[in-house]
Amino acid sequence: MAIEHRLVETNGVRLHCAVDGSGPLVLFLHGFPESWYSWRHQMAALAPYFRVVAPDLRGYGESDKPGGVAAYALTELVADVAGLVTAFDARDAIIVAHDWGGGIAWQFAMDRPELTNRLVVMNCPHLAIFQQHIRGNVRQLMKSWYMFFFQIPWLPETLLGLNDAWLLGNAVRNSTIQKDAIRDEDIRMLRAAASRPGALRSAINYYRAAFRNDDVLAGLPPTVRRFLYGDRQFAPPRERLEDWPKISAPTMLIWGEQDVALNRDLTLGMDPLFTTPPRIEYIPDSGHFVQQEKPERVNELLLDFLGRAQAPVATSADVAT
């Protein structure tokens, strides 16, 4: 099957989408600093059974890149996904997401349960769990140093964009465990997408917008909040997991165990956030980019969770672009 590329209108922006297959809608949401291309293996595996759509999220790749930090607020990103469900004439969607796409997916499942058929998130903690760990886990706080660096105006995108985003490609390469899984050509694709005008600023604006979100700000240690925002007052944090909206969609969390930025502890204690406890699958010998480092295993899990376990597992050799 051949992937079709099209521009889709949603929530006031045009998103470039890679589209294949027919059947129930599956939306793939990528993370930082990627594009639709990070789902190439999974699209090939699921296209025989589903309508698979992998957008470049707003600000990325060939999608629109609105200016200003507010354009990348979580409410806008959730509205983009809701608009895609409508644009593809679906009543709801299976949401499969990684990294920042996972953050959007968690919020989407809480805010738009009627549009969420099933949910699969890879190497992205639920916001409630991440908030707890940022507030009380020094180890995780140190691992998340780059989120604070990204709050500096213009400097992060300038540094990451030097030499056709060489530093960004090198960071992705160095953070993988399965070095052969992400080829030089894959890194070139990533660097080319990141080097589009405005792309890196938009991508980093996701982090800047997140630090204006009340839930995120409330979860920061008081000393960090004071350093960033002085005496500004914020709503009190949701202290208990039970205070968050429960996710009702059947959910699976897939976790590459050797993630350099996110501790495995972030996968624990999640049950109060769901009406039915989520399925959690750990993948050893994989880092953060689990769907690319271990595509065969990830595809097996997806097909099993979505009821297509009898299907043949696709590999990179099956991908047509």
Image (cartoon, rainbow, N blue to C red):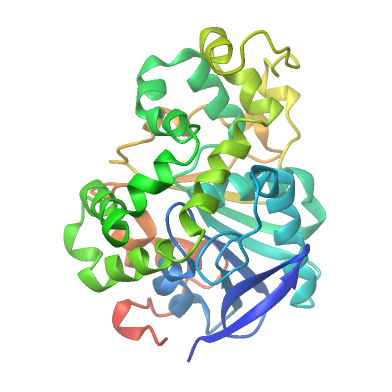
Residue, x 70% and y 13% (percent of image)? 232
Q: Position of residue 79 (x, y in %)?
A: 76, 55
Left or right: residue 143 versus residue 111 is left
Where 126 falls versus 42 (above or below)? above
Where 98 falls versus 38 (above or below)? above
Asked where in the image residue 298 lies, by quadrant, the reply is bottom left
Does residue 217 appear in this view? yes
Asked where in the image residue 66 lies, by quadrant, the reply is bottom right
Does residue 294 appear in this view? no
Residue, x 58% and y 61% (percent of image)? 57
Left or right: residue 170 versus residue 72 is left
Left or right: residue 74 versus residue 206 is right
Residue, x 25% and y 73% (percent of image)? 185
Q: Which quadrant of the rendered structure holds the C terminus?
A: bottom left
Q: How many marks?
A: 0
Residue, x 39% and y 24% (percent of image)? 140
Asked where in the image residue 242 lies, by quadrant, the reply is top right
Q: Position of residue 117 (x, y in %)?
A: 71, 60
Where 188 falls versus 301 (above or below)? below
Residue extending farthest to the left is: 180
Residue extending farthest to the bottom is: 1
Give the camera-side residue of 87 and 25: 87
Q: Position of residue 246 (x, y in %)?
A: 73, 36
Left or right: residue 50 versus residue 163 is right
Q: Position of residue 311 (x, y in %)?
A: 45, 79
Give the camera-side residue of 288 and 55: 55
